[in-house]
Amino acid sequence: MRFFTVLGILFYAAVIILAGVVLIVFSLNLLQPQDIIDLLIFTQNNINSRVILGLSGLLLILISFSFAQLILGRFQREKTIAFSTSSGEVSISLSAVEDLIRRITGVLPEIKELRPDVIATKKGAIVVDLRVVLKSEANIPELTARLQEITRNKLQEVLGIDEQIIIKIHVAKIISREDKERKRKEQESNDSAIPFSGYGRA
Amino acid sequence: MEREESRTELGTVRVHKNVIASIASLAAAEIEGVKRVGGDLKSGIAEFIGQKHRFAIGVEISKNEEVKIEIPLVIKYGYNIPEIAGRVQENVRNSLEKMTSLSIKDINVNIKGIERG
């Protein structure tokens, strides 16, 4: 796997260097537009060179595709929390942890909206970034402390991990009652604007 | 290697990778707390085309006939993940050993998501 990564990097470096050299040569007026046109005409007229060119294009696409897959696969693999058992390895996707946090915090009525972002650091710690929208009646220091406590306890309980869990909270917005009322009214007016919207209701 | 092969007096018995994947999938789904097997994009496409077991579970058979299995799972909310993963590994191992007599090297469980039960 490592060999192919190195090969891919070298290949891309070579292609970019080649493109750079062509541009420099062109800017130094060493390469005339007519030369390029002649080369293209020669390639188009010769069946062998067209076949070679087509196959090279196909090869380029295949190399790019496999290289992209290699990189993406590696990124995907890194986004997990893993531990070993006697039967094999258990890896937990960080998006699964984010799902879990979303559900945990559903029990707090003061939270209007929550967006978790979980990162596993190389040192083994788990950093949870919570971006929350609160209702105006919430006591922020008390609520955020409670949120951190609930999140930490539940993560330790459900994931069964002993690693350090760092929970950062960012209060992005506080929705007031007036905002809520306005939204509710807007919703009601939208509903009433739909013709036959109440038709058939029990 | 595509199939696990064993020789009997009457001939050879070949177990296809898909059979191993199906057994593993059914054994994993038996465990309480498992919402479904799969959960990634590949499994979603496989489920859509009706080939759920075939693509959701990864099966590798090494040259010395050891089997390595990758099982993506979605767990129900409220269950302890290491406990569920352990039970899945145990049930899959037992089912495969009972039904195919294969030598199981690794059963890797990947938790892809958590959903309400």
Image (cartoon, rainbow, N blue to C red):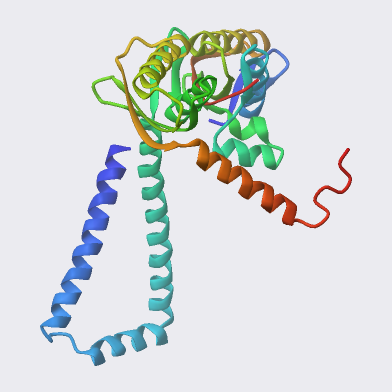
Q: Residue furthest front?
A: A178
Residue A145 location in percent, x, y?
35, 17
Query: Would you say A185 lies left or right of A20 here?
Result: right
Q: Nearer the viewer, residue A25 or A153?
A: A153
Left or right for A63, reference A121: right
Judge from the rendering whether residue A96 lies leftward or rightward of residue A81; answer left or right: right
Residue A188: percent from left, percent from top: 68, 47
Residue at 68%, 52% (x, y): give it.
A189
The residue depicted at 43 percent of the width and 71 percent of the height is: A54
Q: Observer-nearest residue: B1 or A96?
A: A96
Number of numbered discs visible in the structure rendering: 0
Residue B80 position (above or below residue A20): above
Looking at the image, which residue is at 23% across and 63% down? A16
Relative to residue B104, is residue A56 depicted above or below? below
Q: Nearer the viewer, residue A202 or B17?
A: A202
Question: Relative to A175, does residue A67 appear above or below in the rendering?
Answer: below
For this orientation, the residue located farthest to the left is A28
Q: Quadrant of residue A79?
A: top left
Residue A194 location, quadrant: bottom right
Residue A119 occupies which quadrant of the picture? top left
Which residue appears at 72% of the width and 50% of the height? A191
Looking at the figure, which quarter contains the C terminus of chain B? top right
| A186 up-or-down from B83: above or below | below
Q: Position of residue A67 (x, y in %)?
A: 36, 49
Q: Answer with left or right where residue A24 lies relative to residue A154.
A: left
Give coordinates of residue B25: x percent, y percent: 64, 22
Camera-side residue of B33 and B11 = B33
